[in-house]
Structures are given as C-alpha cells and as structure tokens.
Image: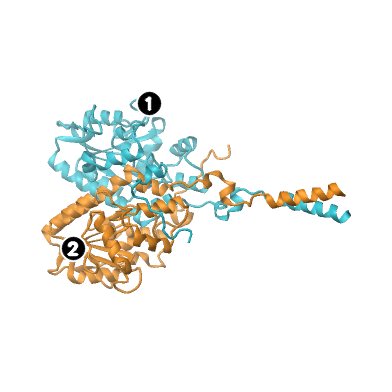
Chain colours: A orange, B cyan
Amino acid sequence: MKRLALLALTLLAGCATAPAPTAASSSTPAAAPQVPATMQWMYGSGESGASSIQAYHAFRDHVLAAARSRPVESVVLAEGATLAAPRFIPCGDRTLAVVLDVDETAIQNLGYEYDEALRGRSYDEGIWARWEQTGGNAVLPMPGAVTALRAVRAAGVTVIFNSNRVSAYAAQTAAAIEGAGLGPARHRETLWLKGDVGAGSAKDPRRAAISERHCVIAMAGDQLGDFSDLFNVRELSLPDRRRAATSGRFAQMWGNGWFLLSNPVYGPGIRGGFDDVFPADRRWTDPGAGH
Amino acid sequence: MKRLALLALTLLAGCATAPAPTAASSSTPAAAPQVPATMQWMYGSGESGASSIQAYHAFRDHVLAAARSRPVESVVLAEGATLAAPRFIPCGDRTLAVVLDVDETAIQNLGYEYDEALRGRSYDEGIWARWEQTGGNAVLPMPGAVTALRAVRAAGVTVIFNSNRVSAYAAQTAAAIEGAGLGPARHRETLWLKGDVGAGSAKDPRRAAISERHCVIAMAGDQLGDFSDLFNVRELSLPDRRRAATSGRFAQMWGNGWFLLSNPVYGPGIRGGFDDVFPADRRWTDPGAGH
C-alpha cells in the first residue's frame, strides 16, 4: 500500500510539474523573437529602399511639371464622387500644394516596429499613443523623401501632411517630421491630424479643408485611404477594393498625381483568406505532392 | 488500499489521455492554413496593385522618352564596374531594348504561392520545377504590365525577358508569358534563362549577351539582382546592400532606367535579424511596458 501511495503521489507530482503546453514552449522557433518577413523587406531590404526612392522620384517629377502647367483640376476627389463616377475638385486660382501621409509614407517608424517585433505583439492602440508622444527620435525619413520634398518646396509648392496620428500630440508629431528633415509642419496649416476636422479616421474631411485654400497637385500615401475614403467603405470586398484601385480612372492616377509607397507591414490591405487573395481560376496543386 | 489503487489508475489515465502538446494543437490559429501577410499584401491588396501600376507607368514614360532621345549609355553596368565606381555599357548604334525579370515582375505566380500558403510550406526547388512545367495557366500579369509593354513595343523597342527559370523549360515559360498577354518571348532572342549563358543564377552574363546586340534603355525587376549581380555579393551585409542601392549613383537609377516592382513574398532582401533590420540608433522601448 505504501508503494502504491508513493506511486500515486509520484504520478500526481508528474502531472503537476509538467510544463503547461503553450505555443511558445512547444515550438522552438516561436520562442526567440524574429523579425517578420514584412519588416525584413520594409526596413532591411535594398529593394524597398529602391521602391521608395522610385516613388519619390516620380512624385517630384510630377509635381515640378504640374507646378509649371497649373492643372485645372486637383487630385482630390470632389464631394459626391463615387468609385464608379470619380470627379476631382477644380483648382481655381488657389495656391499649389501636395498632401502626404506621415507613417510609412514620409517617415519609417523603426522604433515602434522594433518594439512590436521584439515582443512578438500585434498593433496596440495604447502603445502607439505612447509612441506618438515619445518616439520622435527613433524614426528615419522614407528613402527619397527628404530630397523630393526639398525640390517641391523650392518650386513654390506647399507641403502638407495629413495623418491619423491624433491632434493631441501635434507638437510631438511635428517634431518627429521636422527631426527627420521633412519639415516644416505646422498644426492645422501644414499638418492635419485626427480630431482636427471631425473625430474619425476618415481623411476626406481634412482633404476638403485643405482644398479650400489649396490646389492639391499630388498626394502620397501607403494606404488607399490616403487618397480617398471611398476605398475604405466596409461593404467593399477585398477583390473589389483591388479592382477599384487598379482599373478605370483610378488606375490612371498611380504615378500621375497619386503616389503609392509600398508597405506590407500593416494596413487595411493586409487581410483576407484564400478566397480573397487568390482568384479561383488561378490556383494550382503540385502534381508531385504526396509522391 | 483499493481506493488508493483506483486513484493511482485514475491519475495515470488522466496523464495518459491528455493531448500531446504540439504547436498545432495548442494554438488554434496555427492549425488552419492562413495566407501570410506578405501574400495578402502582394496578391490581395489594392495597394500593391497600385504600386505595380505606378512602376509600369514610370517605366513606360521613361522608355518612350529615351526612345526619342537615344541615350549614349545603356542602363546595364559595364564589365569591371563596382558598387563604388559604376560605369554603364555605351549604346553605339545598337537597337533599343528593355530587359525585364519574369516572376513577380511581369507575372504574378498566383498558383504556386497558393499551393505554398495552403500547405504552409516554404520554397521548394522540386515543386518550383514542376510549377515551371505545369503552372503556366495559373498566373496573371502584374498590374500595369500588359499596357506598358504594348506601348514599349509600339515605340519600336524590343522587350526581352531575363529570368532564373531554367533553360530546359523555355517553351513552358514562353507560353506562360504569352498566355498572360506579355509576349512574344522567343528563347535566346527575347527570353534568356538560367543555363543559357553559363550555368548559374547570375544575370550579368546574360545582360552582357543581350547588350552585344541591344542598347538596353530600361530594366525592371523585383530583386536587386535583376539590375546587377554586384548586389548579390556574399560579403555584402544587409545594411550595406540597402545602403548601396539607395545612395550615390544607384539611388539616381530608380525610376530613371531601373524600375523596381515591390515583392515582399520572397527574395534575398527578405532576411536578417534585429541588428540587420533595425538601426541601433533608432530603437524604442515602450515606456508603458510592464505597467
């Protein structure tokens, strides 16, 4: 009986001291933090640096040409425009401007993404708020941005930032932009933030406010919402969203008034299952699988 | 004693029937195949479609302008050129051409990447070989490529593909290119493959062969090796590789003879640990962590 009791205790102890099966302990690669492939490409590769410079070269060339010719229409969609029937705000004699997003368009948020990768976490609103407040020195300009914005300003065109960073930290965001060599950025003049016009993340109201004083001849961003909120309508499926951006009038805009900075790290374009991402008629199964 | 023996058996049974802690069973999301973020961006997002169109607009505009002005120098580096001292092959009176990579530059390999994501596997040489042989219908052109190449050919400029697909499957690769609306592609005339000039993956020898008959006025690719093998030298650290591509003479090439298609899904730029990807002086630790 004593041995049996001992056995029972041993078994109990064995059960109790077995490490809890967590994802981290059961799979070695997950235990050590790794840099996600998206960030490797975005912040580490020469390819993404080249892509950014290429976008800013096209941006600069377009702006300098448009500044000489003074276009009749801006590149901001007019109120009432739809994906099926786009119309642009007329320029009148308003002063020329360009409108850029900030994060992963003008600056690389290296410090924030480092922290995210190191801790293996996903986006966190509270951490991002602290990043806006304290991270301004841990950024770099996007490759090509500094020289392009310098050329744009030298041509007499106003550089305006339109970001979903919050109005409350305008001073810190302006300091981050200026510290990266991309300034000046003055709140509600050349820096528009979430909370400045209405409360939400929609950027159309801010684009409308900017357009009251300026003829916007180019926009740059890493998300379709940096060009029009129409792309962020909830009912739009992922394939329809891609189709809208790459066909008809909008297809003509890329590199021709609208300038896209490639960012696979985050954003509303990075989602979807197999049916959203891979067209049903373009699939393939390895004929050698299982052999 | 009987109760104790029963307890021991119960404990044993409890231990024995507990599910084995594997990565798949302990974390539900890992069990079902998911589309990696890199593929979501690349094949599903409107942003990547826009980025591709933008690159092809710049490519087309550059080629049409260069075809009119007939440049003195090609955009192919001359033998003996280095990253520190780049020199380009003179054009002479050779006929004008452009040189494009194939995979994720001219075509999207949707079928192959679908199979890879569905099976949660990484790149496999054998599967890729079967893909080259049998996958030609499961591709789409990169957004903007068809209209750009049509305009380039209409301007009298020869379109040449330079790919690391293998010479043995030239017919299948030509069929994939032509099926996507990007042809014609004739082996060793307008389609150069691994094995055509030497045995390796280096593309410089093929670029040299192409340059014997053509003045190359633009190149397009998703990897730095699509422009020069100098970027693939093993001793080059990841930060030095990015620096080489984004400074000096090479920085000027992007959008100006060299055209980069963004591809975060695969390639030699997608690697590196924290020290490679995040500059030491641009790090940040959330001051609220642990509170």
Q: Is residue A228 above or below residue A9?
A: below
Where residue A219 appears, as percent x and y from the top left, is: 24, 60
Instruction: Please identify the residue farthest to the bottom as the structure is shown.
Output: A198
The chain ID associated with circle 1 is B
Query: Left or right of A60: which side holds A43?
Result: right
Residue nearest the observer in this picture, A78 or B30? B30
Q: Give the amino acid type for the residue marked by disc 2 in the picture.
A: Ala
Residue at (16%, 68%) from the top-left corner?
A: A91
Where residue A250 appears, as percent x and y from the top left, is: 28, 60
Residue nearest the observer in this picture, B284 or B168? B284
Residue B199's tag is 1
Q: Give the amino acid type for the residue marked by disc 1 in the picture.
A: Ala
Residue nearest the observer in this picture, A227 or B145? A227
The chain ID associated with circle 2 is A
Where residue B137 appears, as percent x and y from the top left, is: 42, 45
Q: Which residue is mark 2?
A: A97
Mark 2 nearby-residue class (10 Å; few <14, some 14–19, many ≥20): many
CA gap, disc 1 to disc 2?
A: 53 Å
Residue nearest the observer in this picture, A191 or B63? A191
